[in-house]
Image (cartoon, helix red, strand yellow):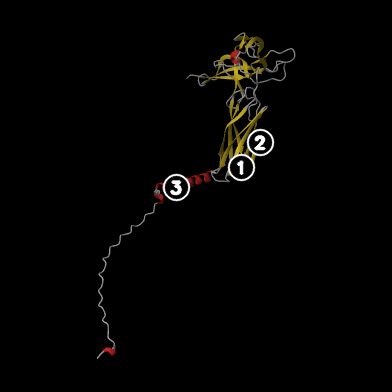
């Protein structure tokens, strides 16, 4: 059986005590920027104009009791589809930004036990680079494949640790945010009042600008006649939404109405931008929905039948045929005897 390879990458773990304090760390090795004389840097914060070349250094530290060899490479960053977390491309994926512009002096490095190695790198910004933020990382990848029971496991794991790079290219910065594809799905009991009801609101958060955003999202639901059913800020939102990235998110709504008609509105905001999107909803218990659907279907059938000049079979009523009456021959007219004029008694002789 062919094994599926999974890359486990740590680019966000921060220790908070030692001078090498801001290293991305997985417990076995860490990667971090070389500290300046002023202070340790949590990440690489770099700025450059198009066509400019930057030089810096990265340190890889080995925390184990044996030497470790790593593949050292630069990678572009993106938001994961599952929760919007910060992640970077693998070494086999195509790199378009920082991953293509940054080049370590050594692509492979062996770090002694409990030791560290510092490697210089250059970052050349193309002349036609777009202004704004270009996030990425310098990654130390252990190319060994780790698996449990080789006979039963179909997944092999590669581990990597990356130090984040936040590069801003000079030029106009445009913060812009969009809320797209707002949907709501209801979860209703079969019989009204017997069981809890709820709903799930789903939406897409899209960074349409060229700078990294820290978005805030608020959910508001209104029922019939404008009644406020729900109003709260959402917590399951990416702390960093990178330029051009889309993230599909969901928010549960417990205690959603079982019978109502209204709409939900999602408002996303960040410094310099604010956008909203809405969708309507009709909340009906399953039993009422089925009965309403059956009634509507019956009405449609009747209307169509009337327009077509026929009646559906279940509305047809059998009528007895009326027998035609037997024609009656007209009787002949009766000729009456004309009465004679009677003479008066005085006229008799």
Reply above or below: 317 against 247. below
Residue at screen point 44% across, 47% down: 303
Determine whether label 3 and label 2 are within 8 Å by CB.
no
The reply to whether residue 268 is visible in this rendering is: yes
Q: Nearer the viewer, residue 157 or 45?
A: 45
Determine whether label 2 and label 1 are within 8 Å by CB.
no
Sequence-wise, the earlier of marks 2 and 1 is 1
Residue 232 got which mark? Answer: 2
Q: Position of residue 225 (x, y in %)?
A: 62, 44
Q: Nearer the viewer, residue 94 or 324?
A: 324
Which quarter of the rendered picture does the C terminus lie within?
A: bottom left
Q: CA distance from mark 1 to mark 3?
A: 32 Å
Left or right of 296 in this view: 180: right
Residue 232 falls in image quadrant: top right
Foreground mark, 1 or 3, reads 3
Left or right of 315 in this view: 270: right
Sequence-wise, the earlier of marks 3 and 2 is 2
Q: CA distance from mark 3 to mark 2?
A: 46 Å
What residue is pinned by disc 3? 303
What residue is pinned by disc 1? 223
Q: CA distance from mark 2 to mark 1?
A: 15 Å
Q: Nearer the viewer, residue 14 or 105?
A: 105
């Amino acid at each position: 059986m062919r094994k599926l390879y999974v890359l486990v990458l740590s680019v966000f773990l921060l220790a908070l005590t030692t001078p090498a304090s801001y290293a991305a760390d997985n417990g076995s090795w860490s990667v971090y920027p070389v500290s300046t004389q002023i202070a340790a840097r949590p990440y690489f914060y770099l700025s450059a104009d198009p066509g400019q070349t930057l030089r810096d250094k990265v340190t890889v530290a080995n925390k184990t009791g044996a030497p470790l060899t790593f593949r050292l490479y630069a990678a572009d960053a993106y938001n994961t589809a599952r929760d919007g977390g910060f992640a970077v491309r693998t070494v086999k994926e195509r790199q378009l930004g920082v991953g293509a512009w940054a080049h370590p002096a050594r692509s492979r490095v062996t770090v002694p036990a409990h030791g560290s190695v510092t490697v210089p790198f250059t970052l050349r910004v193309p002349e036609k680079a777009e202004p704004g933020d270009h996030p990425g990382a310098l990654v130390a990848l252990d190319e060994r494949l780790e698996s449990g029971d080789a006979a039963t496991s179909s997944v092999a794991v590669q581990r990597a640790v990356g130090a984040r790079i936040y590069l801003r290219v000079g030029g106009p910065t445009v913060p812009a945010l969009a809320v797209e594809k707002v949907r709501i799905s209801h979860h209703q009991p079969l019989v009204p009042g017997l069981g809890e009801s709820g709903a799930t609101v789903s939406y897409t958060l899209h960074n349409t600008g060229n700078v990294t955003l820290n978005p805030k999202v608020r959910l508001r639901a209104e029922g019939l006649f404008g009644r406020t059913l729900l109003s709260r800020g959402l917590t399951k939102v990416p702390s960093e939404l990178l330029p051009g990235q889309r993230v599909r998110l969901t928010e549960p709504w417990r205690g959603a109405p079982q019978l109502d008609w209204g709409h939900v509105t999602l408002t996303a905001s960040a410094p310099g931008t604010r956008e909203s999107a809405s969708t309507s909803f009709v909340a009906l218990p399953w039993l009422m929905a089925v009965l309403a659907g059956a009634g509507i279907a019956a009405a449609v059938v009747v209307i169509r039948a009337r327009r077509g000049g026929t009646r559906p079979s279940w509305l047809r009523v059998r009528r007895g045929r009326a027998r035609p009456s037997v024609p009656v021959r007209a009787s002949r007219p009766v000729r009456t005897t004309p009465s004679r004029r009677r003479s008066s008694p005085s006229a008799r002789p």
